[in-house]
């Protein structure tokens, strides 16, 4: 009876979770299917180049500079003052400049791709794929502002779910169809850019159903840009750390190791814990809009209660996942890929530990972002980023691919310890306050 009562009380949250997890399951199945099919069509070396391109696409996301995170806090203020024209004009101007920066970075990467890929015969392939993926990166930059507002300010949870379905599940199925039809790796970034355009169009349509967007060059406020550059820096540093931890490993392998196929082996070894973390992270992500509402209303005690529960749940689930992957991961991967890749058991175990550090890191990272503590974390995050890069280089040379996993765990733990101390202090400061939980 208690369980039924709890479900009825949190009906929306339960529905959100069920839909979100159904989409995650579909996305995972389509991803696994796509990897196996695409790997058989491209073989390990060429597929490794595509892995590098996709990692590059993700890393280019750091050039949002935290502006879209700041936008969710500024939106209500500008809306209240009937000044959304200034808000959107300024933010879209920022997105335009971000896109110019991305283009410049792509030009640099294009000219120095021989440094990224030690095997020179794959350098032209990398360059072609990079240019074809650039439109998708730019569409994503403009879309990110509207997506953040729809999710955090309008609480369009289902919109986020549809975008995930499109960008992961459907995208992967389109990759398989595209490769089977054209048998050319260049079709992959073209499909990625098309899906990014569709995502942007859908997001714009959803927002325009709520409010009109008016853009005027005369309404672009330089003071808005300058102030938010300062405010967004802390959000940006926090997000950079996650990009560095999850995306840079494959580049170290490509630059240092002569066998580019190791990129594929490492990325697929990483995949199991990545799949698990998608499930675990979704719990904190779904709670984010509610947490922001509680924090904005001054209900700090309720915020503490939510994150205490999230930490316990994440620790339990990630520990179970670590044990499961450690014992079964190697066999699952080799059966799934028909033994086209022979995996290293030690590497599987080390990477599975990231289930634990990654899930706790994610909860605490969300806590800082939604409670205004991100400014206190930026210095330690810089240390995390630098330590990860330095340790990755040193440990890869001395311990091989296992060293990359160890570097990620060590650098992740630095930030976890520090942010947890901030959470403990926040908890003590709001101990004993009345909790007034608002419904989803």
Image (cartoon, helix red, strand yellow):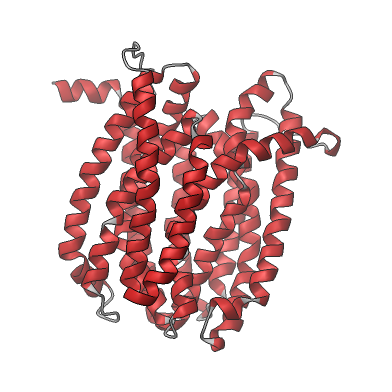
Compared with residue 347, is residue 148 higher up or lower down, i.e. above or below?
Answer: above
Q: Say which quadrant the C terminus sits in.
A: top left
Percent of width and height locating residue 15:
33, 33
Q: Residue furthest top?
A: 434
Front one among 343 and 190? 343
Q: Quadrant of residue 76?
A: top right
Compared with residue 378, is residue 429 higher up or lower down, i.e. above or below?
Answer: above
Percent of width and height locating residue 344:
25, 75
Q: Residue furthest bottom?
A: 121
Horizontal arrangement in the rendering, residue 315 relative to residue 23 (left or right): left
Q: Quadrant of residue 427?
A: top left
Q: Quadrant of residue 210?
A: top right
Horizontal arrangement in the rendering, residue 151 relative to residue 11 (left or right): right
Front one among 238 and 156? 238
- Residue drawn at x 22%, y 70% as measured from the top left: 346
- Residue drawn at x 26%, y 59% as measured from the top left: 352
Compared with residue 394, is residue 373 higher up or lower down, i.e. above or below?
Answer: above
Percent of width and height locating residue 116:
55, 76
Horizontal arrangement in the rendering, residue 172 relative to residue 131 (left or right): left
Percent of width and height locating residue 253:
43, 75
- Residue drawn at x 32%, y 63% as measured from the top left: 406
Q: Say which quadrant the N terminus sits in.
A: top left
Compared with residue 45, is residue 316 higher up or lower down, i.e. above or below?
Answer: above
Q: Is residue 54 visible?
A: yes
- Residue drawn at x 34%, y 42% as measured from the top left: 417
Q: Is residue 177 visible?
A: no
Front one among 27 and 116? 116
Q: Residue furthest right?
A: 218
């Amino acid at each position: 009876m208690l369980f039924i009562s709890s479900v009825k009380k949190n009906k929306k949250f339960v529905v959100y979770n069920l839909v979100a997890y159904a989409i995650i399951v579909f996305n995972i199945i389509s991803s696994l299917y796509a990897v196996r099919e695409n790997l058989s069509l491209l073989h390990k070396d060429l597929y490794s180049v595509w892995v590098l391109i996709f990692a590059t696409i993700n890393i280019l996301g750091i050039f949002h500079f935290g502006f879209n995170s700041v936008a969710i806090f500024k939106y209500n203020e500008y809306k209240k003052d009937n000044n959304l024209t200034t808000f959107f004009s300024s933010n879209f101007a920022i997105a335009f400049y971000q896109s110019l920066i991305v283009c410049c970075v792509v030009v640099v990467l294009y000219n120095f791709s021989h440094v990224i890929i030690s095997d020179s015969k794959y350098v032209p392939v990398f360059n072609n794929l990079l240019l074809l993926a650039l439109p998708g990166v730019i569409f994503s930059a403009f879309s990110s502002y509207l997506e953040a507002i729809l999710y955090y300010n309008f609480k369009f949870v289902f919109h986020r779910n549809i975008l995930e379905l499109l960008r992961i599940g459907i995208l992967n199925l389109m990759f398989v169809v595209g490769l089977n039809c054209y048998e050319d790796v260049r079709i992959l970034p073209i499909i990625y850019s098309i899906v990014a355009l569709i995502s942007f169009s859908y997001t714009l349509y959803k927002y325009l159903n709520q409010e009109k967007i008016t853009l005027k060059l005369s309404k672009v406020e330089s003071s808005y840009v300058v102030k938010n550059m300062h405010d967004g820096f802390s959000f940006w540093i926090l997000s950079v750390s996650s990009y560095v931890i999850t995306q840079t490993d494959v580049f170290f392998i490509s630059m240092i190791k002569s066998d580019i196929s190791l990129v594929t082996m490492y990325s697929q070894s990483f995949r199991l814990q990545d799949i698990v973390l998608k499930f675990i992270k979704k719990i904190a992500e779904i709670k984010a809009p509610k947490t922001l509402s509680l924090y904005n209303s001054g209900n700090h005690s309720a915020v503490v209660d939510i994150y205490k529960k999230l930490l316990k749940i994440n620790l339990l689930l990630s520990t179970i996942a670590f044990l499961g992957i450690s014992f079964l991961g190697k066999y699952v991967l080799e059966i799934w890929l028909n033994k086209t890749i022979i995996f290293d058991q030690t590497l599987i175990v080390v990477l599975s530990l990231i289930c634990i550090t990654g899930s706790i890191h994610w909860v605490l990272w969300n806590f800082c972002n939604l409670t205004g503590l991100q400014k206190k974390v930026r210095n330690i995050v810089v240390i995390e980023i630098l330590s990860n890069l330095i340790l990755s280089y040193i440990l890869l040379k001395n311990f091989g691919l296992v060293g990359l996993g160890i570097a990620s765990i060590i650098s992740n733990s630095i930030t976890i310890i520090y942010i947890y101390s901030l959470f403990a202090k926040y908890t003590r400061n709001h101990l004993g306050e009345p909790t007034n939980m608002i419904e989803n």
